[in-house]
Image (cartoon, rainbow, N blue to C red):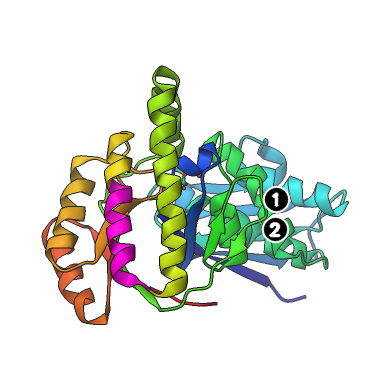
Amino acid sequence: MPAINASAPGKVILFGEHAVVYGQPAIAAPIREVKAKASITPDPKGEVGAVHILAQAVGIDALLVDLDDSQPLAATLRQVCAHLGVKSLPACTLKITSTIPVAAGLGSGAAVSVAVIRALASFLGQPLPDEEVSQLAYEIEKLHHGTPSGIDNAVIAYAQPIYFIKDRPCEKLHVKKTLTLAIADTGISSPTKQAVGDVRKARQADKKQYDAYFESIGSLADSARQAIEAGNIEQLGVLMDANHGLLRKIGVSCPALDTLVTTARQAGAFGAKLSGGGRGGNLIALVNDERADAVARALIAAGAVRVIVTDIRKA
Ligand code: PMV
């Protein structure tokens, strides 16, 4: 039996991060320029249950039996087995590679989960529909994030732009006019779990104010959906700027993000904002084909460690 391979894209959140944890709508899109890959090679001579996990980037080279469920990869494998009613796995090697930067707001954890779930389900001869893949990845997201909204696993499993509200089926978005984004990395690693935890504490201290911020972010996401569906790029840029302003207010931006956001706007972006958990990681700037190069160059000159220019279009 040949190796079974599966991959999953990275993602950006276009609107609504953090507020989405509190029930507000958000918009996210897959980024195909970066991806996680899982490859499972059977070992016909090995004993049943001898599953070798290799994930060099995170320093894992271990047997499944030696890892407990606090290790997300081990938890993922066991969860897929439980879901599919498989008691023990045939001997095999699972190899994971990824070009998605870790702790940068591009969905690396969820993409690894989705790739592993798909590869294992296919390896076991029971490929899963996107919805079940998303649900299983959500369980693993809880290990990464604590209290995730579920947007990362959903956008990555469906691999389409989505409009998302927590605990509701996600809606695929109709993108009327292709959106060109420059995604710039501050190079600052920032775990989402920490930012989400800090926002939770700040909300506990001032619930009324924070809920008002979240509602404003939610209405921006609703307006953004209309702008995306109408192909109104300029309006979308204005909404992005407003969303970044609110993310600053809830305390998840940082000087490096603010500098790069301002740089992108000055270099001709229609709008820009941080994307994901914040405090570092990536920002997104809405550009068009003519402006993309100038904005990308300006971002690098202002300290971005990497810029990806990508298109978001109707799937
Ligand atoms: O994984 P990140 O950093 O893109 O963050 C996900 C978005 C948050 O709203 C901050 C958290 C969540 O669970 O929705």
Numbered tag placed on residue 133 in the rendering: 2
Chain part drawn in magenta: 232-244
Query: Are dots 2 and 1 in contact, CB under 8 Å?
Result: yes
Query: Could you tell me which secondary element the residue under label 2 belongs to?
Result: helix
Crowd class of label 1 (few under 14; some 14 to 19; many from 20; radius 10 Å):
some
Q: Is mark 1 within 8 Å of ligand 1?
A: no
Secondary structure under the numbered disc 1 in the rendered image? helix
Q: Which residue is mark 1?
A: 136
Task: Tell me where residue 94 appears, x and y as whole percent.
Answer: 65, 59
Q: Residue at x 38, y 36 (%)?
A: 213
Give residue 92's quadrant in the image: bottom right
Q: Is residue 293 left or right of residue 180?
A: left
Mark 1 is on which residue type? Leu
Residue extending furthest toward the bottom: 290
**x and y, in percent, of residue 301 in the image:** 11, 62
Furthest-top residue in this view:
205
